[in-house]
């Protein structure tokens, strides 16, 4: 078993890919701000899950990586809120995120 078989990783990866697809329609002036930030933070959730899995034998490192994952998830939620408030996301897309 590896981190890719974890349901949490699969869901995070799927959501990061959905965010990538949705953010393709963001205005070009957002390319280096909102678009880049939301993509990076959503991908970081997956990366931190993978790192946490590798550190699972070391409880403090494991918890630290999961804490990082939670922080990146909160950041992603904030960027989604901005995208919705700026009318870059439909209500349906916002509700799923």
Image: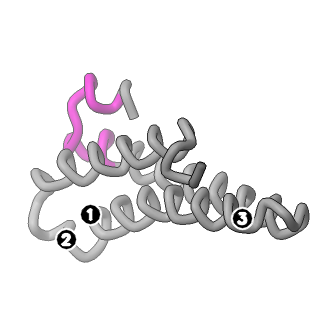
Most extreme residue toward the bottom is 32
Question: Which mark is on residue 65?
Answer: 3
| Position in image of residue 42 (x %, y %) | 43, 56
* Circle 1 or circle 3, nearest the eye: 3
Range of magenta residues: 83-94
> Badge 1: how crowded within 10 Å, few (<14), some, or many (20+)?
many
Name the residue: 19% across, 71% down.
31
Q: Is residue 83 above or below residue 58?
A: above
Image location of residue 25, percent across then percent down: 10, 51
Callout 2: SS: helix
Badge 2 or badge 3: first in the primary sequence: 2
> Toward the viewer: 4 or 21?
4
Relative to 35, 69 lies left or right? right
Which residue matches tag 2? Answer: 31
Residue 97 in picture, x, y percent from top left: 39, 35
Find out whether the residues at labels 1 and 2 contact each other: C-beta distance under 8 Å: yes
The answer for how far apart the CA atoms under marks 2 and 3 are is: 28 Å
Instruction: Give the residue at x 89% y 61%.
Output: 59
Q: Residue at x 39, y 67 (%)?
A: 40
- Secondary structure category for the residue under label 3: helix
Residue at horizontal 36 percent and vertical 50 percent from the top: 16
Disc 1: which residue: 35
Q: Using the rendered view, name the quadrant where residue 6 is placed.
A: top right
Q: Crowdedness of circle 3 by 10 Å Cα count: few (<14), some, many (20+)?
A: many
The tag on residue 11 is none
Q: Secondary structure at mark 1?
A: helix
């Amino acid at each position: 078993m590896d981190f890719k078989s974890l349901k949490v990783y699969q869901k995070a990866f799927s959501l990061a890919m959905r965010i990538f697809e949705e953010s393709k329609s963001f205005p070009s002036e957002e390319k280096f701000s909102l678009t880049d930030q939301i993509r990076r933070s959503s991908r970081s959730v997956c990366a931190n899950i993978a790192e946490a899995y590798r550190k699972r034998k070391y409880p403090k490192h494991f918890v630290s990586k999961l804490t990082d994952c939670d922080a990146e998830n909160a950041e992603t939620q904030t960027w989604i809120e901005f995208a919705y408030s700026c009318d870059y996301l439909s209500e349906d897309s916002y509700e799923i995120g």
